[in-house]
Image: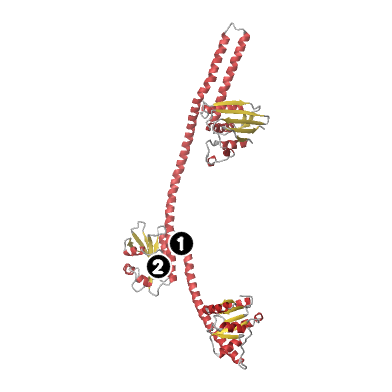
Amino acid sequence: MTDSRPAILCIEDNSMNWRLVQRLLSQAGYEMHWAEDGLKGCELALALKPALILLDINLPGLSGFELAMKLRQDRSMDGTLLVALTAKTMRSDRETALVTGCDGFIPKPIDPFRFVGQVEAYLGGQRDHLDQGREGYALRQFSQQVVEHLEVQLKEAREGNRKLLGIQDELERRSHHLSRLLSLSKDLIPIRDEHEILARVLSQLHGELHLERLRFYRVHESGAYFHGTGATPEGVEDSPVLPGEHPLVTWLETLPVGCILTGNELQQSRSWQLGIELGLWTPRTQALVLSLRSRSKEQHLWGFLAADRSDQAFEPFETELVAFYAGILQVSLENAGLVFHLDRTSQALGTSYEGLESTYEALKETQKALRAQNQKTALGGLLMNLAPRFQEPVGTLKEASTALLLCLEQPDLSPPELRSECHRSIARVQKAVRQVDDLIRALLRRAGQNEVRSPEWIHLHDLLREELDLLRAEDILPGSLSVELNLQAPRDLLYGVYSDFSDILGHLVRHAVDGRPERISLRTWGGSSHFRMELEDDGASIEPRLLAGAFEPFPDLRPAMTEPGRRPGPGLTACAQLLTTYNGTVQMVPVERGSLLRIDLPME
């Protein structure tokens, strides 16, 4: 719309007429709007307040005359012109248009060459008027048209109401069927007997659709034949079996999934005569057949349902209802079979579990015996490895004892010299006894480490020496590997569990040995309140990015190596956890070569 042209609303139910009006007036520069019926036109007119409304008389719902009177009753529409577009050319029709509130009328079909000029004339002030004395006649004419229009609408309303009542009855009938179907599906959930499931479903379907014959066939587990069940007003009974290669079965396998055939479509198929021969239906009845596919293998025919009755053809809703019943029957039978197999499997599993439980108890006893035997074997091996370690202190005992005896047998030695030599021999004996005693005590502790662990006062320096000897004996610490000890801590007495600190040392040594070093250095220092220890090796280096996570749990989840080197030992996580119990800490200090582990342990 241009700034100088007003808006025009055309209320017209014929789209071709509207397009013609729009093209002519749009080319003239007017802003055009369109509504296709009286109600929409009324709403649009009240919203737009256009300068002119072109109003078709014969509108659906609200007629043009009625719409004109409604708009004229609204004071906000006083400035809007109403021009009727009507194919009615009788004088009475034009007078009716004027008496209902129109300012004029333009006859249909419109003249494309004159139409724009006619619209502009009304916008310019032209108005049509009733002849004197014709107003009463026009009102009576309009009243008669309103009555006729109301009669037509009343007739349409009655017809619509009749259809609605029919639809309501049909919906109530369907709701009744579906309610019974839903109730049946709930009742079938706990049932496991297949015969009872068949009886309930087929009997209810037989009664719902007033069937004469109802047969249901399902493939046997072997796949060689179909066994059938028939429903009659008297109840449910078995039907003759049907071979798997029967022509009817072959034909049903070619049907699409979920296909239902009824009426002429079934009578014209090649299965019609086959069904008559099998007694599924008779030549003069309305029949139905539904094929059911396996839910696990859709290409295989799982079963089919056939029914007939003589009074009336099957309606679409009834065929849908048959499909619902057949689906519920298939699911219920399959679930019952599955539950049956599950029950048998559960019983077998229960029996197997009892056997496994007794076997497990026997295995536990065997494992206990093996553990004891393994412990004996391990201790035997450890003793064999410790035997050379005992040779030195035992040899010292022998030598010192012999020297002591020789000294005592020398008559020419002065008493002071004799006493001095005896003291030296006795010191050597005492040292050898301590060595043997320490090794035996460490061995006994190691043998009893799987028993209840009790805290005790421990000299950490003695523990380090004893455990290093045992690690050598167990070949965890190679005999060729040099170990430098520098134990300078002024205080090493701590109350704790011996095996905790033997495990800590074992994890540290295993980490060092994994780097294939040539030398290991173990040193201690500290003060009155802390015990500090370092274990350093000159083996392979550790990537700097792995140092921070050396003591994190799940070492197997650490990122893969990207450069030559080695990972932190897998036992360092357990080492850190054990030290946490004693409020201690362990850290890995960066070094140029090998690794350096530092332990800080409070002594209070």
Whether residue 517 is visible, yes or no, is yes
Amino acid carrying label 2: it is Ile
Relative to the observer, which residue lies in front, 322 or 504?
504
Q: Residue furthest right?
A: 528
- Where is residue 568 shown, x and y percent of the image? 55, 36
**Residue lying at 43% horizontally and 47% vertically, measured from the top left:** 351
Q: Could you say which quadrant of the image residue 520 lies in?
A: top right
Whether residue 467 is visible, yes or no, is no
Relative to the observer, which residue lies in front, 108 or 449?
108
State which tag comes first along the sequence, 2 or 1.
1
Amino acid carrying label 1: it is Leu
Mark whose residue sits in front, 2 or 1: 2
Between marks 2 and 1, how big is the CA–CA gap? 24 Å
- Where is residue 556 shown, x and y percent of the image? 53, 40
Which residue is tagged 1? 188
Task: Point out the image quarter for the C terminus.
Answer: top right
Tag of residue 498: none
Which residue is tagged 2? 260
Above or below residue 90? Residue 473 is above
Which structural element holds mark 1?
Answer: helix
Which structural element holds mark 2?
Answer: strand
